[in-house]
Image: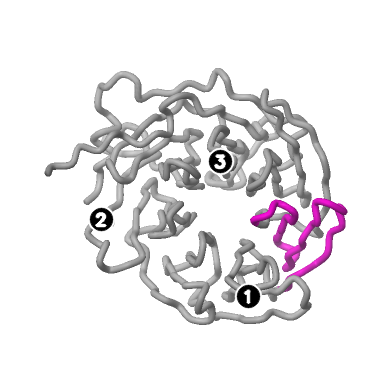
Amino acid sequence: MSGLFGAAATSSTGNTIGDLKNDVAVSNPPEDTVSDIAFSPTADILAASSWDKKVRIYQISSTGASEGKHMYEHDAPVFSVDFSKDGNKLVSCGADKQAKVCDLQSLQTVQVAAHDSSVKAARFFELPNSNGPMLVTGSWDKTIKYWDLRSQTPVGTVACQERVYTMDVRNSLLVVGTADRYINVINLQDPLKFYKTLQSPLKWQTKVVSCFTDASGFAIGSIEGRCAIQYVEDKDSSANFSFKCHRDTPSNNITPVYSVNDISFHPQHGTFSTAGSDGTFHFWDKDAKHRLKGYPTVGGSITTTTFNSSGTIFAYAVGYDWSKGYMGNSPTYPNKIMLHPIQGEECKPRPSVKKR
């Protein structure tokens, strides 16, 4: 079931093209490509990790103005950031083989996790009856580890088939994407074993996994301009499908395809964005199998995206993503974080037309 969005995306409904005219740049952006961005669940505070080895925290005002609030460093490029549910803590991890947590009240930063290789992703989660937030980290050392922030040693380790490339958590659902296209689904109520393992339905390397807002499934993005919608439970498998995106019009029987670098779900509507190496982002409705809006190129690859907690701001980072190798980079390549205000119906699901 491929190309469902593709057909809709080329339809001449007229209003499927969005505009970027109200997008605002974050002031004092990182000095190298942004690897990850995250909004606090409790305020419009944006964190960004970068290849420049730093984590920056910005306060975003209601007008879109931004002010740098804090910055701290790792010993190597930083790959991932995530806020705790109460917004009081920020975790970051990267090529220095560790994860750090910054307390946003005291601005103290402590190392909380270590691996034998680069740590690609870190996510907070909470379990019933636990005393505060827990942490899960995924590494190129082919393990995921769980951490209680009060302890120096992991409370659990799970071996994966391959290096961890991407990871996401929603409620009790943890999804881990590794090299060789393995996708591991874990129920955090039983965190030391895989609830389910599958090979990605997409043919090429997994770039990103992102959990649905209701945790019933997840989206997968790959390097070949394709996205898959996957439900956790077998009873819902008839709703699984994949579709093409982030591709140029074919020319001389060649279709240029681009990596899907990030997928973000809207916190209220459950619709989602895809963003890619082609420098475009799009909003989609998975239930109606329809593209809601597509946007013109932003002038450089989009490396990472996120919505704020109220769903009124879509943030995206523009920077070189190495999709064209060393030769594709240049000192003039744009490097910025943009804030796109969500207008009107942009992210609202299409009204469903169900047969009685």
| Residue 335 rendering spot, x and y as whole percentages | 67, 35
Residue to which mark 3 is pinned:
307
Q: Can the viewer see residue 311 in this picture?
A: yes
Above/below status of 104 relative to 297: below
User: Label 3 vs label 2: CA separation?
Assistant: 25 Å
Helix, strand or loop at disc 1? strand
The image quadrant that residue 215 belongs to is bottom left
Q: Residue at left 64%, top 25%?
A: 24
Going 42% across and 36% down the picture, which residue do you hit?
A: 283
Residue hosting label 2: 239
Percent coordinates x, y for residue 144 in the rendering: 59, 74
Q: Residues within 10 Å of mark 1 (few under 14, many from 20)?
A: many
From the image, give the main secondary structure of the stretch colored magenta.
strand
Answer left or right for 339 relative to 186: right
Looking at the image, is mark 1 or mark 2 nearer the viewer?
2
* 208 over 126 or under it: above or below: above
Disc 1 to disc 3, how far (Cα)?
A: 27 Å
Task: Please tell me which of labels 3 and 2 falls first in the chain.
Answer: 2
Is 308 or 93 nearer to us in this picture? 308
Q: Is residue 97 magenta?
A: yes
Which dot, 1 or 3, sits closer to the camera?
3
Of labels 1 and 2, earlier in sequence is 1
Q: Residue lying farthest front?
A: 129
Residue drawn at x 25%, y 43% is: 3
Q: Residue at x 35, y 40 (%)?
A: 285
Whether the residues at callouts 1 and 2 have beta carbons within 8 Å, the answer is no
Q: Nearer the viewer, residue 131 or 227?
A: 131
The residue pinned by badge 1 equals 145
